[in-house]
């Protein structure tokens, strides 16, 4: 491993780094240069077994600790994560190519928020008392057992923490498999949790591609699977989990609408469109990639957007001045280039960007298409890159029907100064996470997740507890028990 902050081995199992170089090698590529900066090895069946055994063996004792004790460990981990924010952010930037300007304020920060929030909540998890005349029922909130987390490559530290924190708070243990494209940062989450006092086996990380994920999902020792990934992968994982009647959380893709009404503040709407399309070079699941702009504000919006985009600083993502980095991989870059070519072929008007940069690494310009129509491929499919599609519209009913005319339902946003309309539009959106005069905020206190094909379950907030625990009802009879014979 080249960089000092990198983990020392491929897997973290039972409280320690573990290497098994008989697994398939996975090169770690720095997206800003294309250079190989490290190598991990895919988990062999023996490693998968070791991780699941460790998680299974550790679970009962972890669940037997009080919520206060478990929570203290999570909150300590949050503190360590914040103390090491710089190093973790540098590593996240190597892993993903996202600019340090972003990683230093979003990734480990958001991971620490989740650890702190669910750490604080661990001691408050209780059942309830239900009086039935003399008799009564009480409920116990119990863990599910062993949870598997499977991550996408856009937010490695955040995803590992958003899944791990509520799982552990509820008394589950976890085996987490990061995306093969970004294998490094989840190992740091495991390392920090154990340094903070998590007993061996409570949080394990193993590497691998889809086959390793599939082996974890199919294993009888696993009680719950939480996936962040694409819809096609979600379908496979959901189906495999169904075979074992396992609990699932699915955080999948999107093609979210953002509606800008004539009366919106242009500057704020442009900010929303930039945050909702170009942050993390557009590799954000909840991005508002279908921007519907009412005719009266269209020219002002496009002019200001083009001016603001000229201010993007594209380059070395480790330089704190850089505000726009490369795509995560050559493959993802190729996918984005394909969609841009497709947009031009289908008649959308390219108003900004569109070209790969003539430099090492996987850089492509922030790209804007105008005059996009609802049937174009770039209007229907998730691109997962910095490609904004701008549509025209005239009235509210029309735009609501068009905004909801998608198989996805992850997020949606509206920009307007008319408060009644803002809330009416938010209520009408078929999406799990909606924004009024802002876009892409994801605080740990608020539920996050999708409807329709974008997923099931919610991450973050009190709502996540329901997805990482189960209720047991205990009926208590106070008197004699009668029976028919
Ligand atoms: N809703 C949300 O919270 C988020 C959703 N995403 C979505 O993730 C996608 C991009 O991430 P990718 O890594 O390309 O997604 P992907 O679906 O290709 O892979 C996701 C993960 O699933 C694993 N996997 C693949 N096949 C599997 C199988 N058969 N069984 C078990 N695991 C398997 C992969 O190794 C990876 O770790 C986009 O569609 C994006 O919208 C990304 C971030 C957040």
Image (cartoon, grey):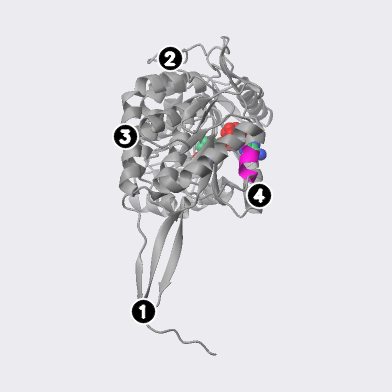
Are the residues flagged by discs 2 and 4 in contact, CB closer than 8 Å? no
Q: Position of residue 169 (x, y in %)?
A: 39, 45
Q: Residue furthest bottom?
A: 485
Query: How many residues crowd mark 3 within 10 Å: few (<14), some (14–19), many (20+)?
Result: many
Of callouts 1 and 3, the N-terminal one: 3
| Circle number at residue 210 | none
Going from N to C along the chain, the mark reached first, 2 or 4, is 4
Foreground pick, 120 / 398: 120
Give the left or right position of residue 205, taking residue 476 as reference. Answer: right
Q: Are marks 1 and 2 in contact (CB under 8 Å)?
A: no
Q: Nearer the viewer, residue 161 or 187?
A: 187
Helix, strand or loop under label 4? helix
According to the image, label 2 marks what residue?
318
Query: What residue does disc 1 label?
Result: 478
Q: CA distance from mark 1 to mark 2?
A: 67 Å
Q: Position of residue 167 (x, y in %)?
A: 45, 45
> Is residue 255 visible in the rendered structure shown here?
no
Q: CA distance from mark 2 to mark 4?
A: 40 Å
Q: Upstream in the sequence, badge 1 or badge 2?
A: 2
Mark identifier at residue 239? 4
């Amino acid at each position: 491993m080249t960089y000092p902050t990198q983990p020392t081995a491929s897997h973290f199992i039972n409280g320690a780094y573990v290497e098994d170089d008989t697994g398939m090698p996975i090169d770690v590529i720095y997206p800003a240069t294309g250079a190989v900066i490290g190598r991990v090895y895919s988990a062999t069946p023996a490693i998968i077994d070791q991780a699941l055994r460790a998680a299974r063996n550790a679970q009962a004792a972890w669940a037997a600790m009080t919520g206060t004790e478990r929570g203290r460990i999570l909150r300590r981990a949050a503190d360590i994560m914040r103390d090491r924010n710089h190093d973790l952010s540098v590593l996240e930037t190597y892993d993903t190519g996202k600019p340090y300007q972003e990683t230093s304020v979003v990734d480990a920060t958001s991971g620490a928020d989740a650890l702190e929030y669910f750490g604080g909540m661990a001691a408050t998890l209780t059942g309830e008392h239900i009086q039935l005349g003399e008799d009564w029922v009480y409920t116990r909130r119990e863990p599910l057992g062993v949870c598997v987390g499977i991550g996408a490559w856009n937010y490695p530290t955040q995803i590992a923490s958003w899944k791990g924190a509520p799982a552990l708070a509820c008394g589950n243990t976890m085996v987490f498999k990061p995306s093969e494209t970004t294998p490094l940062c989840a190992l740091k989450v495991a390392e920090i949790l154990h340094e903070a006092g998590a007993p061996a086996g409570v949080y394990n990380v193993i590497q691998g591609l889809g086959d390793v994920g599939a082996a974890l999902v199919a294993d009888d020792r696993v009680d719950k699977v939480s996936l962040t990934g694409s819809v096609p992968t979600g379908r496979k994982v959901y189906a495999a989990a169904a075979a074992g009647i396992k609990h699932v959380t699915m955080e999948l893709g999107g093609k979210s609408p953002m509606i800008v009404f004539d009366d919106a503040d242009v500057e704020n709407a442009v900010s929303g469109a930039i945050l909702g399309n170009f942050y993390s070079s557009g590799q954000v699941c909840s991005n508002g990639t279908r921007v519907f702009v009412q005719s009266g504000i269209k020219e002002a919006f496009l002019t200001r957007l083009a001016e603001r985009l000229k201010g993007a600083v594209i380059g070395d993502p480790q330089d704190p001045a850089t505000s726009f980095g490369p795509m995560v991989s050559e493959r993802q870059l190729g996918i984005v280039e394909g969609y841009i070519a497709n947009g031009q072929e289908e008649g959308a008007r390219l108003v900004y960007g569109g070209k790969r940069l003539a430099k090492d690494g996987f850089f492509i310009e922030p790209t804007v298409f105008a005059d996009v129509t609802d049937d174009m491929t770039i209007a229907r499919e998730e691109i997962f890159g910095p490609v904004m599609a701008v549509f025209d519209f005239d009235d509210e009913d029309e735009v609501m029907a068009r905004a909801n005319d998608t198989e996805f339902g992850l997020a949606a946003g509206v920009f307007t100064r008319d408060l009644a309309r803002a809330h009416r539009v938010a209520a009408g959106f078929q999406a799990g996470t909606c924004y009024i005069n802002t876009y892409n905020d994801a605080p740990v206190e608020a539920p996050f997740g999708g409807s329709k094909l974008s997923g099931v379950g919610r991450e973050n907030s009190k709502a996540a507890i329901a997805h990482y625990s189960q209720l047991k009802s205990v009926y208590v009879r106070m008197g004699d028990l009668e029976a028919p014979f």
